[in-house]
């Protein structure tokens, strides 16, 4: 056999049509094929018979593995194709959108792969609705036309029957075929003979098997004499009759197809995925795919306009009939906990076919049909691609491997060499690191080694972006990993890049024996006012997550807080192992319990106020992952920002309308309301643009964290407090804020910040090459830095003029390069630039804008900008 392109390799070697080139290259690695050097890429078989034993001859069987509900249909189709001497005609029944056309195509591929029909034959498709009311044209289409049969036919024309000779003819919507049309096919289906339209004596023959498909009941539209000529009737189940796992696979398959089609990564939220898994889909697979594409198209708009770096689908982008099911669905809650678990906020489908942060994956039958669950450890491993790979090596509930008795399970997945390497590496690392690695780590390491060695055999290297950082921070583990690389090189005779040591190091530093990990888990406690508020919320969270983790304590309004505190201390003293404690409280004196618990029990605590169910869920999930107390606290603080994606995922318009805020911080509730009311009355502002937000706390760390949390939702323009806290925002003293000069200062700040908020909308209509919100955000930073550095006070109107000039200048430069200043000063500009040191300061501050937008300001433009600042300052 000669050299073949990948396309003809798929045909000649009986591969599926979408087999990637890298899978074809595996035959080269196995010595069963050769690859020709140079371009184009060509392959040649070494031994034809060897490959035929490896390829997917049974494409229907492969389809069945992904769709178990089609078992009967697949068996019927195989029987119809293989039945001697030439197979049987088939009638496919099913609702609209169940995949009848796709199933017919798979039948043809199966027949080709098993040498029932030639590889050159194709599936000829005829939609019976096209000529349902014209029998003469119907005859012409099916059987062909003799020259001169009617006016305008000046040559013989072949029909679809002749075109499909030695293959299959697919009659779609066969219920639209009139009775006359059905009767026309009787003779051909019985004896394989026919005549073209206009022929009287000539008899033609063809060997064609007919696959007919209909959405209607056969007895309602088809003649009984017609249906009896289809010995095999195949019924395809509706989507609602399929298993949930099948539907999940379909959703993922469609998203991967879309990602590959548009060559962009597609990120989809857990809620959006869940909606596609469960919503009522009356038009079956066809509608499911259409709804997915509709959501992709809506998200694509934000991507192409530069609002997002990748296509991101949240529940806001779903068709209304899809998102509505999120409000009512409770049936599959247990399954969502296992598959999604609430830990992964987004799943990303890449054009390469990779799926990042997917919480479940299904292995093929060849791998024992085992369902594994992956643990989302992005908070431990970081956020890079190297971390996503390592996350996939862990499982959430360790359902597959629980003891050393399950070691045979591991050996089913890896070769003997990998198993031996795993043992050697574990022995060395346990001794050197003084750690105990259990069976789950052994599984993770085995899979990692196998994937790594297979990748390196094809010269597919992965650069670890944090290599040097890991080497410095975890020198001990890194040195052990280097020694492990030497063991691998000696064992398999392959050169291991140093980046692989970083991957091994990450495994070492983020792993502990499961018993040790459980002992170190932070405990979560919920304390709330009311007769049953805390215990009810705790029960809800435990039921949702299917755990018994969070403990609730109710504080009745009739009971002194001290009594509940004593009960909590008594409860903590019953613990066999002291663990850190994360307290979630609603308000008031409960926030002071942590200090008493530390003093009385020696247990470190962190306290979160204004508790909600979502806070508790996030706290429990992070605690079960083994995160330290401080990280859990920070994760829960950001829960609104991380989970409620409305401020990042709805649209650029919503992000533009992010409100401004003045935050007033006080340790006492006594004077704050009066001060807040007076300040609100003396300031002029738009309530839809700015809010004054009070915070009551005396804990500096708590204040800092709450300010950070507030900044996720608001743009803080000033913080007013008497408590000395480090702050990145402009700060005024609470007891001096009502002074006239401070009121004037605050009003000026509000006017300027409001100006930039209101600038976005008009600039949206002016700018053509970039997002108005992005430009205004960056221009604001630059203008404020320049005015502060030069000690210039600019009015709100001055900010408008300068910001609009800079925004339009940047947009113009993105189109056709540098723009002349209104006053061209080429020579004078250069001279002014050389003798004015202030211009160099302007140039330095503007460099940030140049870097952000990949542009360059000329000397003349910088001189003109400086003049704008000076003319408008006071």
Image (spheres, helix red, strand yellow):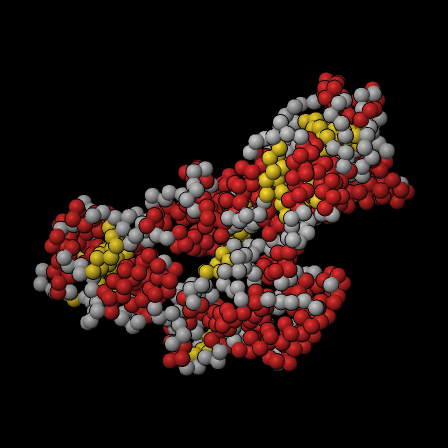
162 with respect to 183 (left or right): right
Relative to 434, does residue 397 appear above or below in the rendering? above
Residue 403 showing in the rendered view: yes
User: Residue at position x 63%, y 72% from top?
Assistant: 426
* Residue 198, x across and y down, in percent: 13, 57
* Residue 852, x across and y down, in percent: 71, 46
* Residue 128, x across and y down, in percent: 23, 50
* Residue 772, x across and y down, in percent: 64, 37
Image quadrant of residue 506?
bottom right
User: Residue at position x 49%, y 72% from top?
Assistant: 408
Point out the residue furthest to the right here: 835
Residue 160 showing in the rendered view: no
373 with respect to 713 (left or right): left
835 with respect to 238 (left or right): right
Relative to 209, does residue 48 appear above or below in the rendering? below
**254 or 533, which is in the foreground?**
533
User: Residue at position x 68%, y 62% from top?
Assistant: 509
Q: Where is the C terminus found, in terms of image quarters? A: top right
Image quadrant of residue 793?
top right
Q: Where is the N terminus found, in terms of image quarters? A: bottom left
Image quadrant of residue 234?
bottom left
**648 or 184, which is in the foreground?**
648
**856 or 497, which is in the foreground?**
497
Point out the residue furthest to the left here: 201
């Amino acid at each position: 056999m000669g050299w073949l392109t990948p396309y003809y390799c798929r045909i000649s070697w009986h591969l599926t049509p979408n087999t990637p080139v890298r899978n074809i290259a595996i035959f080269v690695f196995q010595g069963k094929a050769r690859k020709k050097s140079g371009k184009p890429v060509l392959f040649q078989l070494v031994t034809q018979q060897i490959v035929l034993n490896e390829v997917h001859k049974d494409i229907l069987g492969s389809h069945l593995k992904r769709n178990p509900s089609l078992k009967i249909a697949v068996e019927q189709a195989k029987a119809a194709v293989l039945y001697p001497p030439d197979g049987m005609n088939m009638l496919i029944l099913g609702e609209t959108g169940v995949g009848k056309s796709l199933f017919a195509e798979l039948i043809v591929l199966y027949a080709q792969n098993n040498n029932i029909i030639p590889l050159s034959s194709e599936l000829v498709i005829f939609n019976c609705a096209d000529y349902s009311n014209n029998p003469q044209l119907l005859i012409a289409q099916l059987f062909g036309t003799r020259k001169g049969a009617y006016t305008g036919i000046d040559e013989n024309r072949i029909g679809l029957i002749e075109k499909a000779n030695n293959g299959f003819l697919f009659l779609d919507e066969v219920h639209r075929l009139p009775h006359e049309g059905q009767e026309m096919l009787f003779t051909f289906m019985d004896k394989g003979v026919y005549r073209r339209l206009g022929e009287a004596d000539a008899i033609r023959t063809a060997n064609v098997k007919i696959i007919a498909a209909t959405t209607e009941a056969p007895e309602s539209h088809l003649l009984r004499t017609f249906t009896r000529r289809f010995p095999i009737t195949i019924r395809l189940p509706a989507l609602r009759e399929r298993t949930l796992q099948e539907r999940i696979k379909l959703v993922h398959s469609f998203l991967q197809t879309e990602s590959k089609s548009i060559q962009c990564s597609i990120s989809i939220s857990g809620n959006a995925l869940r909606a596609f898994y469960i919503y009522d889909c009356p038009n079956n697979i066809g509608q499911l795919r259409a709804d997915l594409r509709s959501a992709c198209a809506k998200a694509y708009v934000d991507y192409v306009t530069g609002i997002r770096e990748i296509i991101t689908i949240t529940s806001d982008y779903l068709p209304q009939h899809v998102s509505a099911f999120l409000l009512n669905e409770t049936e599959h809650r247990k399954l969502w906990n296992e598959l999604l678990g609430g830990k992964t906020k987004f799943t990303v489908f890449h054009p390469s076919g990779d799926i990042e942060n997917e919480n479940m994956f299904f292995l093929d039958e060849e791998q024992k049909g085992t369902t594994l669950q992956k643990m989302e450890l992005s908070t431990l491993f970081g956020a890079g691609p190297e971390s996503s790979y390592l996350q996939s090596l862990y499982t959430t509930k360790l359902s597959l491997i629980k003891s050393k008795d399950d070691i045979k399970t591991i050996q089913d997945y890896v070769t003997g060499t990998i198993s031996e390497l795993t043992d050697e590496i574990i022995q060395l690392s346990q001794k050197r690191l003084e750690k105990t690695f259990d069976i789950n780590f052994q599984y993770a390491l085995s899979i990692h080694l196998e994937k790594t060695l297979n990748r390196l055999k094809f010269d597919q290297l992965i650069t670890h972006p944090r290599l040097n950082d890991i080497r410095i921070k975890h020198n001990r583990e890194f040195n052990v990993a280097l020694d492990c690389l030497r063991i691998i090189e000696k064992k398999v005779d392959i050169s291991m890049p140093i980046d692989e040591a970083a991957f091994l190091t990450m495994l070492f530093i983020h792993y502990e024996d499961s018993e040790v990990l459980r002992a170190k888990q932070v405990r979560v406690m919920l304390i709330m006012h009311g007769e049953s508020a805390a215990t009810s919320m705790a029960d809800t969270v435990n039921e949702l997550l299917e755990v018994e983790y969070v403990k609730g304590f109710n504080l009745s309004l009739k009971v002194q807080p001290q009594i509940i505190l004593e009960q909590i201390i008594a409860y903590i003293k019953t613990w066999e192992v002291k663990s850190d404690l994360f307290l979630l409280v609603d308000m008031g004196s409960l926030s002071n319990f942590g200090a008493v618990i530390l003093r009385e029990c020696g247990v470190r605590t962190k306290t979160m106020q204004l508790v909600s169910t979502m806070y508790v869920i996030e706290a429990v999930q992070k605690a079960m992952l083994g995160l330290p107390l401080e990280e859990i606290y920070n994760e829960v603080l950001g829960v609104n920002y991380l989970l409620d994606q409305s401020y990042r995922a709805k649209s650029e318009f919503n992000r533009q309308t992010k409100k401004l805020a003045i935050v007033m911080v006080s340790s006492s509730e006594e004077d704050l309301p009066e001060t807040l009311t007076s300040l609100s009355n003396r300031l002029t502002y738009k309530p839809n643009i700015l809010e004054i937000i009070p915070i009551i706390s005396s804990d500096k760390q708590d204040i800092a964290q709450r300010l950070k949390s507030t900044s996720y939702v608001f743009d803080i323009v000033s913080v007013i407090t008497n408590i000395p806290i480090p702050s990145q925002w402009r700060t005024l003293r609470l007891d001096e804020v009502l002074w006239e000069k401070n009121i004037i200062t605050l009003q000026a700040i509000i006017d300027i910040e409001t100006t930039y908020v209101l600038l976005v909308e008009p600039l949206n209509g002016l700018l053509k090459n970039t997002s108005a919100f992005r430009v205004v955000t960056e221009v604001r930073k630059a203008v404020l830095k320049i005015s502060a550095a030069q000690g210039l006070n600019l009015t709100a109107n001055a900010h408008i003029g300068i910001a609009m000039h800079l925004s339009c200048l940047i947009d113009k430069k993105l189109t056709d390069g540098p723009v002349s200043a209104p006053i061209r000063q080429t020579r004078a500009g250069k001279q002014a630039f050389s003798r004015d040191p202030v211009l160099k300061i302007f140039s330095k501050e503007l460099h940030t804008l140049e870097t952000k937008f990949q542009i360059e300001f000329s000397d003349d433009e910088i001189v003109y900008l400086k003049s704008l600042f000076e003319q408008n300052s006071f």
